[in-house]
Image: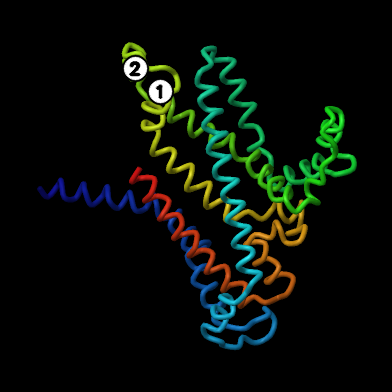
Amino acid sequence: MGKKHKRIKRETLISYLMIAPEMILMLIFIFIPIVYAFYISLFDWNAMGTKTFVGISNYLKMMQDLTFKSSLLVTGKYALIYVLTVYVLSLAAAVFVNSIRSNKRQQACRIGIYLPNTVSTIVAATLWTFLFNSRNGYINKILDGIGVGRQLFLGSRSQALICVAIVGIWVVFGYNMIIFLSALKDVPSEYYEAAKIDGANAVQRFFKITLPSIKGTTIFVLVTSLIASFQAFDQIRVMTSGGPGKTTEVTVYYIFQLAFEQYRFGYASTIAVSLSLIIMVVTVIQMKLLRFK
């Protein structure tokens, strides 16, 4: 018993030592900044002068802030477009790639779909800004050529948010496709063979076998996509700066404006802390709903 106890203690110690570097990094770059942000949210501070303690005044002010409420609504719209589209496209791409029998062709398709994920969001946003240009953009030239007519895209109140979402979707859906593809390859082929014998068609096999078998992966993709959608900033900064008419001003961009343009660091921290809590609550609810289903 003594040797077994020592071995267990040694293995436990090794395990803790292996995860220690990551835990230390999380403590330094995640947990401490969150605590400090909450501390700053209790003050009126412009990052240069002295801090003035205001307690929960910033939180009470936030509850009456129409711009904050508007940014939350825009964030919700963006999340809905982003999460649903990323999920459908990445799963469809994974099913398509998985259906290719030739290993070389499958690998070529996998690389081609994943390739946009190697491009930074800033570069992708710059590229798509040229494509969406209302005067000389290639997309408008194509639309002109087929007789649809030119579109305002980033200058349109109804189209700008969709255009911004397209950039985020284009960058990330290949990564999620790889995740789904790995899950699909783990589904036993015997399930499909048995279903074929029972007379199930392709659609029935997809909904009765494929989707239930990759439920864990589905939860992971939906949750991570939701969190990413609430953190959208780069493409909005490059492409629209929150316009036109604040139709693409998501909450993260509003926080950026408050902190680095208006130098209201206390109030910006208040909204940042509140947004973190909202993301946490929405994520927990989403996970519970998906697990229930």
Q: Where is residue 84 in the image (x, y as percent from the top left)?
A: 55, 42
Q: Circle 2 sits in a helix, a strand or a loop, which is it?
A: helix
Question: Can residue 98 be seen in this snapshot?
Answer: yes
Q: Give amino acid for label 1.
A: Gln
Residue 263 vertical position relative to residue 109 in the rendered view, above or below: below
Q: Position of residue 124 (x, y in %)?
A: 72, 42
Q: Which of marks 2 and 1 is nearer the N terminus?
A: 2
Disc nearest the viewer among 2 and 1: 1
Instruction: Report the residue at 69% width, 43% height from top.
Output: 167
The reply to whether the C-beta atoms of the residues labelled 2 and 1 are less than 8 Å apart is: yes
Q: Where is residue 95 in the image (x, y as percent from the top left)?
A: 51, 25
The residue nearer to you, when weighing 278 against 118, is: 278
The residue nearer to you, when weighing 77 against 15, is: 77
Q: In which quarter of the image is residue 281?
A: bottom left
Which quarter of the rendered picture does the C terminus lie within? top left
What residue does disc 2 label? Answer: 195
Q: Circle 1 sits in a helix, a strand or a loop, which is it?
A: helix
Question: Can residue 21 be seen in this snapshot?
Answer: no
Instruction: Report the residue at 33% width, 11% height from top.
Output: 197
Residue 86 vertical position relative to residue 264 in the rendered view, above or below: above
Is residue 115 toward the left or the right of residue 40 in the image? right
Which mark identifies residue 228? none
Is residue 164 toward the left or the right of residue 11 in the image? right
Q: Give amino acid for label 2.
A: Ala
Mark 2, other Cα within 10 Å: few <14 / some 14–19 / many ≥20: some
Is residue 222 toward the left or the right of residue 264 in the image? left
Q: Where is residue 226 in the image (x, y as percent from the top left)?
A: 52, 50
Which mark identifies residue 204? 1
Mark 1, other Cα within 10 Å: few <14 / some 14–19 / many ≥20: few
Instruction: Report the residue at 50% width, 21% height from top.
Output: 98
Color encoding of the figure: rainbow
